[in-house]
């Protein structure tokens, strides 16, 4: 069952409040404040979907309440409908200027009130859905859909910023490249679904073994790359060795109870802050180190300085 929207009615005249509650309580959850201070306190304590706000109130008028609501990051997206007896053009214009979304004059018509509330709630729902869609599109554009690690495109962009920060702060920055050994044999023997599960499992190991400040990326196929800020060459070799051992100790249990195990080879390099103009030379060195690990028997960590 869909939860009902919550409306906050702010009016110092109890008769007006009673009328609004009578009209709206069958459709919405209603919260009432008889003054501006109380309204702001309620907004600080609970979620509200829309505010019906009177203008003429003692101590703090509706304009000031609206200003404060819109200045607060927590509440600035809540739509506000002014309900007031003031009908002059200057008052209406000011209501919009301070952040009001709509304006209903007293005595109001119930059907008009319902329609305007419904419209503002619908607009807010559309805006929230749009924001969710934007966040999801951003996530999809930055991550590999299978493993949920960052993709190569995001890595290329983010690594530039990370390298600039490392140069500015004079801190070490290292690259680790990882490749699954004989991965084609896994796909040929067990099928691509099992291969996908192996990729996902190794991705989870990488996330487990690295920090939030590290950049974990699926670089392509069965190849991964890690960018480790504030980590020396020796430190990154320790991390790479831990990852190697963790993967070697892991096995995937299939439906028929068969066990599938893999190993990984890793290449490590450090960005030369004096001479490297970009991260590309360090990636190339890490790739050379990875090739050495493969050529010398696989399931190893090698370094290229």
Image (spheres, rainbow, N blue to C red):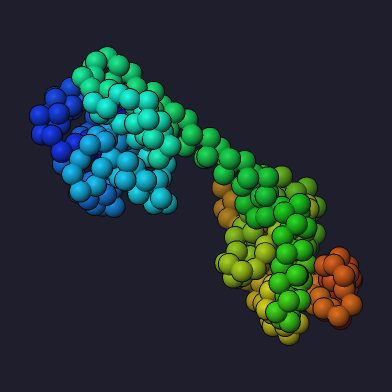
Please state the total of marks drawn on the protein image.
Answer: 0
Identify whether 297 is placed above or below 259. Answer: below
Residue 34 can be seen in this image = yes
Q: How far across and down, in percent of the image, does residue 98 sit? A: 40, 40
Taking depth in this image into account, of 111 and 47 the one nearest to the observer is 111
Give residue 104's quadrant in the image. Answer: top left
Q: Position of residue 134 (x, y in %)?
A: 58, 40
The answer to whether 125 appears left or right of 63 in the picture is: right
Q: Position of residue 147 (x, y in %)?
A: 64, 52
- Quarter of the figure with residue 62: top left
Please name the residue shown 37% across and 30% down the image: 90
Q: In the rendering, at what x and y percent does residue 240 appear?
A: 70, 75
The residue at 78%/67% (across/down) is: 177
Residue 214's place in the image compared with 115, above or below, is: below
Q: Looking at this view, is 97 or 227 the one in front?
A: 97
In this orientation, which residue lies closer to the viewer: 288 or 297?
Answer: 288
In the depicted structure, whether residue 160 falls above or below residue 196: below
Above or below: residue 196 compared with residue 233: above
Residue 259 visible to an observer of this rendering? no
The quadrant of the picture occupied by the C terminus is: bottom right
Picture quarter containing residue 52?
top left
Instruction: Name the residue located 48 percent from the left edge and 34 percent from the top edge.
Output: 127
Identity of the residue drawn at 82% across and 67% down: 279
Is 68 on the left or on the right of 151, as rendered?
left
For the N terminus, the quadrant is: top left
């Amino acid at each position: 069952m869909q939860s009902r929207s919550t409306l906050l009615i702010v009016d110092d005249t109890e008769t007006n409040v009673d009328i609004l509650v009578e009209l709206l309580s069958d459709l919405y959850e209603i919260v009432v404040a008889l003054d501006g201070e109380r309204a702001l306190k309620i907004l600080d304590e609970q979620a509200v979907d829309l505010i019906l706000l009177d203008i003429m109130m003692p101590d703090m008028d509706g304009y000031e309440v609206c200003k404060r609501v819109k200045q607060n990051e927590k509440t600035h997206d809540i739509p506000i409908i002014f309900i007031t007896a003031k009908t002059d053009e200057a008052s209406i214009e000011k209501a919009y200027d301070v952040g009001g979304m709509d304006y209903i004059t007293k005595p109001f018509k119930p059907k008009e009130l319902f329609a305007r509330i419904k419209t503002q709630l619908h607009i807010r729902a559309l805006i929230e859905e749009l924001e969710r869609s934007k966040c999801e599109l951003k996530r999809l554009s930055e991550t590999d859909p299978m493993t949920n690690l960052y993709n190569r495109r995001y890595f290329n962009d983010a690594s530039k910023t990370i390298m600039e920060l490392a140069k500015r702060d004079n801190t070490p920055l290292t690259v680790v490249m990882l490749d699954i050994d004989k991965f084609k044999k896994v796909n040929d023997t067990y099928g691509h679904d099992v291969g996908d599960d192996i990729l996902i499992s190794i991705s989870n190991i990488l996330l487990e073994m690295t920090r939030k400040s590290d950049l974990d990326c699926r670089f392509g196929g069965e190849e991964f790359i890690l960018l480790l800020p504030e980590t020396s060459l020796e430190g990154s070799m320790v991390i790479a060795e831990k990852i190697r051992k963790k993967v070697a100790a892991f096995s995937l249990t299939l439906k028929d109870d068969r066990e599938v195990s893999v190993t990984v080879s890793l290449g490590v390099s450090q960005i030369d802050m004096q001479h490297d103009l970009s991260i590309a030379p360090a990636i190339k060195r890490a790739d050379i180190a990875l090739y050495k690990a493969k050529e010398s028997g696989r399931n190893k960590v090698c370094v290229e300085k």
